[in-house]
Image (cartoon, grey):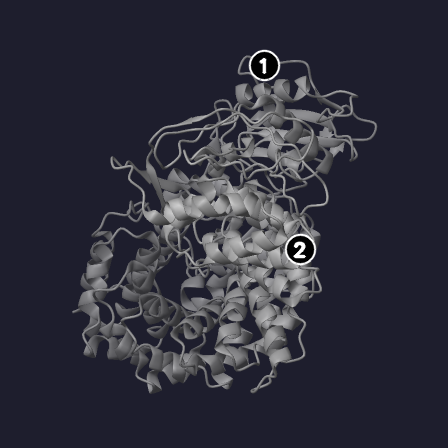
Amino acid sequence: MGSALARAAQWTAAGSGTGTLEITPLNESLLNQIIKFVEDFSTRHPQEAAFVFRVPLEWKTQLSCSEFGEGYEINGSTVQSEAKGEDGQPLLLLMASTFSVRSFDQLSRLLQIAMDKKLKEAQACLEANRDPIVKILGPEYGTIEGEDMSMLHLLDKVKKDDDPETEMKMKINLLLHQLDLQLLNSSLKHISQDIRLNPAAINNEVNLLKNFSGKGEDTVLESLEYTSDYTFSNGCRAPPWRQVHGEICYLVIKPHDTDPLYVTCSTAGVFLNGGQLKGKDDIDYERKSDVCKDIVTFLRERSPRFVENMAKQEYKFFKEPTYEKNYQRMEVVDAKVSGQSQNLHDFTEKNVYEKVKSSAYFSDKAAKKDAEEEEGRSSTVSLKIKKKASGISSESVKIQPASKCKTSGRFEDVSESSSEGEEDEEQPVCHQEGNTDLPSEYWGIQKLAKYLKGGNPTATVIALCSMRDFNLSQETCQLAIRDIGCLEVLINLLDTEEIKCQIGSLKILKEISQNTLIRHAIADLGGLQIMVKILDSPDKDLKRLAAETIANVARFKRARRIVRQHGGIKRLVELLKCISVGSTSLTPYQAKDTEIARCGALALWSCSKSIKNKEAIRKAGGIPLLARWLKCSHANILIPVVGTLQECASEPSYRLAIRTEGMVENLVKNLSSEHEELQMHCASAIFKCAEDKETRDLVRQHGGLQPLSVLLGNSENKQLLAAVTGAIWKCAVSGENVSKFREYKVIEALVGLLTDQPEEVLVNIVGALGECCQEPINRTIIRKCGGIPPLVKLLTGTDQALLVNVTKAVGACATEPENMM
């Protein structure tokens, strides 16, 4: 852990002192991982846990003598452990608020005693012992810098030196190196999200927000003030003894709709503090909330009124972007705003048409924008079938030949998992096209536009049906609908009372929303809000189509947030309530209900990539309904149901529910399905749930280890192989499961897969081997079936997660003399 502390942890200098660990999410994550490592050390490595450190680790503590009990001798203000080293000295000594600890076993017990103070104790220990490996083992062991051959060097040294103490030190050094790699890997994940604010950035944001604050109805805040007017030479307003923790200043913010917020701005971000201390001029500096990247993000999470009024300011002050169309030069005629409904069927033979202002939302900039959506749209297209007329605001635009935009990963697999905080908006990839000739489908859709925009309900339905005759999976047709302004019309049709028009519109939107740019445009035009409302419709076809379209659109985080904020999660969960669960032969009525539930599950699957949406699904009662559907025999609904479960299984509350609701048995059962996609999602769910020992036992008890072993034979499907090897890895943490895997020849199969595999698969394979070779017999099997050379070869790789698992596997194998050869 020396390298991680030196290179990954975030330190702040305290004047001329040695510095302290800043209060940042990264440091908190690193400390928690170190704590877990130490707490588990005695259980997983009992011999190494008893090793006595060369020099004790010493630090100032906040614990008192009264917190110690059995196993310790207390004499006044002194505490010493009953356990002693060979020199007769206690392995733990507390004297004058200073700890002296000499073994991992005592460190582990100390953390258990510290309970909710363990984070502060770990921080104090590491601040006082910046290179703990040197103190534990000696200066010759030091920090391993992660060179490609460093582990080979260590193993070679173990082989040449028969001294038991040296061998013990090398084992401990190997374990600490694994932890170091784990910590460095964790820090890499944080770097892309790491916020390093500075006084100038905070001051600029405060001044900007002040300009829009006050008593007015449309102001974003009532007031925002610093708690101190004094500014130090470095720009900070926090006192020096808080600046060493990375804190910059403190604010009192008064939103219109909540109590005053007492806020700390630090280099790590913005968070709530404890507010003014009663009867004192000081504040409670303790962090009381998650850290946000800036003040605006912090306020968006706490004040709906701020979000609403901020959006108004954005509308007023941000210039609309422009967008170049993907077809030949055309002239657009001015449409005068008259306050009356305008007829949109006045198309000429010269391809003259109306362009509404909201088309500006279709720019690439709008596709990337991650702001909250306003209710309604800035301009709408008038339809004769609507009850209320709406004026059109448009402007003359000359359209130039432009680049043809394609999307990266346009037809994404919705099973691809990631947390909301780590997700990026979908990015369109544009390729310049010199030829602006367009296929006949483009002009055919344009001719239909006048009937779609200006016809009566019957003509509109006919136009919708005719539009569906085109191949809407083609990008040309998708972008034609968008470019000609039909997308606004299709969304407006959803807001009418003509069910046939709504159904026809949704059938088209469902098809074209496979396109990334179309998805963003639908969200920008307020289409998601209307679709969420349609989920309450008594018409089953409408509900089904709305849910399926939401499933397509909600593939980026802003869309998922819109669905949640407008009550979509609860409505989608309601679609899962159906009486036909478990039926093998369905009546037409039951088949329609099942199809509605399938589409609801598809939409929940897309939405479940957001952590907040996972919680919303749970609160809406989604878990027992998903558990019911998991018992059915229809693969078409099982796939989105299991997809949703495996997405949510990253959360501990879902893993507990999957276990207690009896879902493990059904996940195991479906491992033997004919459908590889269903097998993959079941294995992926087991992969995540098998973090818990109880689940690992249930997988074995329900006979899940054998089908997992069989699926290793399907090495062509890499997604399935990644999920299966991951499930085997986590199940192998339990020794009883390892015995079964040995019986099913899993170790030999895993060794056979060590070459020519993606890194994602290799990480899981080597992780599984690392768990299996904790038993001597399995280490022999790995050697006999030729597993040592490919494992050693993987030590020269660069993937951090793979290196962590490889070092563990090689280190375990190296304990056998024959393997060392």
Query: Which residue occupies the extreme right position in the image?
Result: 279
Identify the residue shown where x is 24% and y is 57%: 795
Q: Residues within 10 Å of mark 2 (few under 14, many from 20)?
A: some
Name the mark nearer the viewer: 2 or 1: 2
Tell me whether circle 2 and circle 1 mark residues in contact (CB < 8 Å): no
Where residue 385 appears, as percent x and y from the top left, is 66, 48
Report how far apart the C-alphas of labels 2 and 1 lie in the structure.
Answer: 66 Å
Where residue 192 appears, as percent x and y from the top left, is 43, 40
From this view, report whether residue 195 is shown above or below residue 108: above
Q: Nearer the viewer, residue 189 or 492?
A: 492
Q: Residues within 10 Å of mark 1 (few under 14, many from 20)?
A: few
Amino acid residing under circle 2:
Glu
Residue indicated by mark 1? 232
Residue indicated by mark 2? 498
The quarter holding residue 717 reads bottom left
Q: Is residue 678 visible?
A: yes
Is the C terminus in the top left, top right, bottom left or bottom right quadrant? bottom left
Amino acid residing under circle 1:
Phe
Identify the residue shown where x is 41% and y is 33%: 350
From this view, report whether residue 214 is shown above or below residue 668: above
